[in-house]
Image: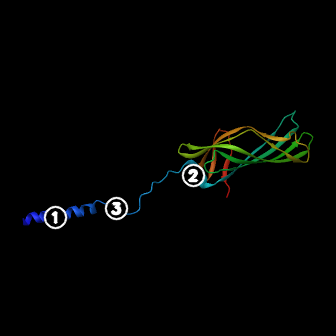
């Protein structure tokens, strides 16, 4: 009996202590780390980006313009979760006409461009699709040959490299967007 009561006591103690050893460890729960999306990466660098395109050249007759110098500045404002961006376009143009007169023109316009986020060879990338636009000109020094600057529809792809959105497609696209503080 002595060993039987001892055996019963050991079993009872074991049953009492058994739940104590099977508990989960107390402490902070592990958090799952969410992978950063291309949109997250680009917006982490900046929400406003700026690029400038320049064009200089000569035009042959019958054009009334002999020499032109055009600068178009694009400021793109991104918003998280949006499929479009607001693109502010500012144009500054200098013309030398065939009669020798000089004309300086400026114009501004805001347009909604479509944006698609993705990856290109592991880098965060975007595709910007700007519709065809006509920027009205305000000129001094003479009358411009056209009342507005026409920009064709533009589809371009950019990748995030360091703190720049660098154009990769189409091959002749020269814009590089820099973040604006």
Q: CA distance from mark 3 to mark 2?
A: 36 Å
**Residue 10, label in figure:** 1
In the shown orientation, is residue 154 left or right of residue 38? Answer: right
Q: CA distance from mark 1 to mark 3?
A: 26 Å
Q: CA distance from mark 2 to mark 1?
A: 61 Å
Q: Are marks 1 and 3 in contact (CB under 8 Å)?
A: no
Q: Which residue is mark 2?
A: 41
Residue 1: x, y in percent? 6, 65
State the image quarter where residue 120 is shown: top right
Q: Which residue is mark 3?
A: 25
The quadrant in which the C terminus is found is: bottom right
**Disc 2 packing (10 Å; few <14; some 14–19; many ≥20):** some
Residue 34: x, y in percent? 49, 52
Count the marks: how many? 3
Chain-order first, disc 1 or disc 3: 1
In the shown orientation, is residue 128 left or right of residue 149? Answer: left
């Amino acid at each position: 009996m002595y060993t039987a009561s001892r055996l019963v006591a050991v079993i009872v103690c074991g049953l009492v202590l058994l739940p104590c050893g099977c508990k989960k460890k107390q402490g902070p729960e592990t958090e799952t780390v969410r992978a950063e999306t291309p949109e997250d990466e680009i917006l982490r660098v900046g929400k406003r980006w700026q690029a400038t395109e320049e064009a200089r050249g000569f035009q042959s007759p019958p054009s009334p313009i002999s020499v032109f110098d055009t600068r178009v500045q694009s400021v793109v404002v991104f918003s998280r979760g949006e499929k479009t961006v607001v693109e502010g376009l500012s144009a500054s143009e200098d013309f030398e006409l065939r009669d020798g007169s000089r004309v300086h023109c400026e114009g501004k316009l805001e347009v909604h461009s479509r944006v698609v986020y993705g990856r290109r060879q592991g880098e965060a990338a975007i595709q910007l699709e700007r519709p065809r636009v006509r920027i009205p000109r305000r000129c001094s020094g003479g009358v411009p040959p056209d009342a507005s600057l026409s920009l064709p529809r533009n589809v371009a792809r950019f990748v995030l490299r360091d703190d720049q959105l660098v154009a990769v497609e189409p091959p002749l696209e020269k814009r590089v967007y820099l973040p604006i503080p």
